[in-house]
Amino acid sequence: MIDQDNNQTPIIERLTTHKPPRDWRSWLIGRPLSTADAAHETIGKFVGLAIFSSDAMSSVAYGPQEMLLILAVAGTQAMGMAFPLSIAIVGLLVILTLSYEQTIHAYSNGGGAYIVARDNLGELPALITGAALLMDYVLTVSVSISSGVAQIVSAYPALFQYRAVLAVVLVAFITVINLRGVKEAGAAFAYPTYFFLVLMFATAAYGFFRYFFGGLGAVVDPPHIAMDALKPISVFLILRAFSNGTTSLTGVEAISNGITAFKEPRSRNAGITLMWMSGILSALLMGIAFLSVQIHAIPSEAETVISQLVRTVYGGRNLIYTIIIISTTLILIMAANTAFAGFPRLGALVAEDGFLPRQMAFRGSRLVYSYGIVALAIIASVLIILFNASVTALIPLYAIGVFLSFTLSQAGMAHRWWKIGKLKPGEEAQERGSVLRYDSRWLPKMIVNSVGALATSMVTIIFAVTKFAEGAWIILLVTPILVGIFMLIHAHYRIVAQRLSLDNFGVIPPHTVRHRVILPVSGVHLGTLFALRYARLLSDDVTAVHVLIEPSDAEKVRKKWEKWGDGVRLVILDSPYRLFVEPLLEYISDLSNQRQPGEILTVIVPEFVSDSRLTAPLHTNTAEILRAQLKNQHGIVITNVPYHVHDEIDLYTEHIFGKELAK
């Protein structure tokens, strides 16, 4: 082992005063924030509800519709089952809320289902959970934005053929806002979210008022739905409708993933926000489902159920109808913000564990995980284009992943309470993501999470069976593929870490016995002499290499090198096929193969740099090509020596080398 105790290595700490310059990015996403500003970027319950709950709350705009779409094939009698099914969905929501409320207080540093599965079930369940949630976040963006565009198309049918383009533009808009930071995104989305909630509750209240006093009626001129023949009501049909309706529960886990975004006491604030979200979602889900059945709404991509409900309640496509459709569109677009808040944070956690590229854990200039935000936007946009922004086509892919993560999370929490039950009063046990402390109420808490795991596992199975042929097989196929990719990335990082590790490093590398420097030269000019001067500083063993493209240039190069080469040997490689890089690489490879132990081979690459962006494209950047090829060679050090051309270079040349070379 190397003895480090006797090494008096000076360590100097210095705070840089440099600030990033303002450029077009500052105008687009805001001025860069320092690390010390992180504490000021936290949010309260009011803004947190808008950021982390918009996905769940906005799902009332498409959840009941997708449930009715399945029931419609069995006729009016089956449509009446929408309200009882919505009550069952709300019951499942209550179970999930109680379960995740416990998760929030147990894991105050966030991470949600991924951290719970990792600490209590192991690496593989954690990776399955992470893959399922990441896919669900992508689908959240795709479905929410597509549903928002569907609301616009309902009001303006002429835009139907442009719905995919509109959706991608909206994804780009949400991306830019999220790149500006959590606090600014919350401020931008809070007021439209609450505006939507006020209008939805007002619509539901007025609809119930008209229903109980006999003036609600049925939807006028409903959209046409193509149907060959009515199908009988079956258990399978009911289960399909239930699985479609449970898409309204996606996003429940987002608050537990983003606890660190809340102000202190963050666990308490996150828990209260979760309760608010659950209450609001339950009321709206049951209210809209009930009223939609009463007005005989017809689920269709041409006009949404929300559009039919609003124009029926308010008597046509009037001003208030337009305002509500706009607010619904906004909340659906902002529902994607839940994914933009959750995907980057989850991606950062997985990256910190070494299962995703490390860049995913880097925070950008606005203290957000910029790589994760951009990656989410690109993947979601591709999905929207592939499915032409069709909510009905995307829904079968949706929610199965999140319910799989629900199941693993609740199973993990149940196991956690079981471990706590084995502790003695006052005893603690440190785990990777939290501290286990004895809790006298561990048994009822374990029962709550066990019931949650059982319920969500049943829904997952229902999804897998009822939606398999409609596209759920894609998720069931992609999930193990993603887990495999995670493992390959982790294996790569582990191998690299082992090779770079200083643990048990007890042999000092041998002293260098020779340092050879190779200097490729395209011609003999001022830049060549700058690079030659630097090469002579590194070693006395310098070899210049010139690849001869045109035989007529050979004598000219020899004469110039004899005059300006300062005694350094020159190797001329004749290239009859006018290749430059290949002969040079072959020569360097031959030298590399002949190296002795401890010998260092350095390639000095002169690089022409123009100070003008306008004239830079006029020059072939051979240095970039050469460096790109050389970096794949093992055991070779590559050094660039840039030389700049500007107005004062002639004066500098005359001062160092004389007037003759300057000419």
Image (cartoon, rainbow, N blue to C red):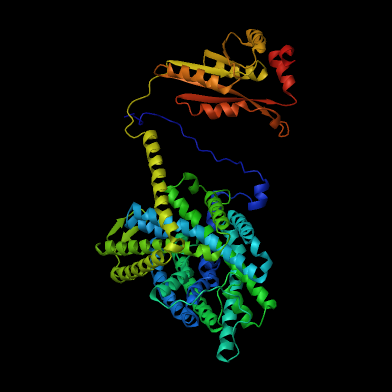
Tell me, yes or no, if residue 145 can be seen here: yes
**241 or 111, nearer to the observer:** 241
Residue 7 placement (x, y as % from top left):
39, 29
Height in image: 105 above or below 593?
A: below
The number of discs equals 0
In the picture, measured across the screen, residue 291 lies left or right of residue 608, that is left
Image quarter of residue 430: bottom left
Question: Is 220 drawn above or below residue 8 in the view shown?
Answer: below
Viewport quadrant of the N terminus: top left
What x and y, as percent, mark residue 15? Answer: 55, 41
- Residue 279 visible at all: no
Q: Position of residue 541 (x, y in %)?
A: 51, 13
Q: Judge whether 211 appears above or below 195 on screen.
A: below
Name the residue nearer the viewer: 248 or 200: 248
Residue drawn at the location 64% of the way across and 12% of the way down: 551
Between 476 and 599, which is closer to the camera in this rendering? 476
Determine the residue positioned at 49% across, 56% down.
343
Q: In the figure, is residue 590 to the left or right of 4?
A: right
Quadrant where the C terminus sits is top right
Indicate the quadrant where residue 597 lies.
top left
Q: What residue occupies the far bottom of the structure in this picture?
A: 213
Nearer the observer, 464 or 17: 464
Q: Residue furthest front?
A: 228
Q: Position of residue 582 (x, y in %)?
A: 54, 22
Q: Residue at x 36, y 57 (%)?
A: 117
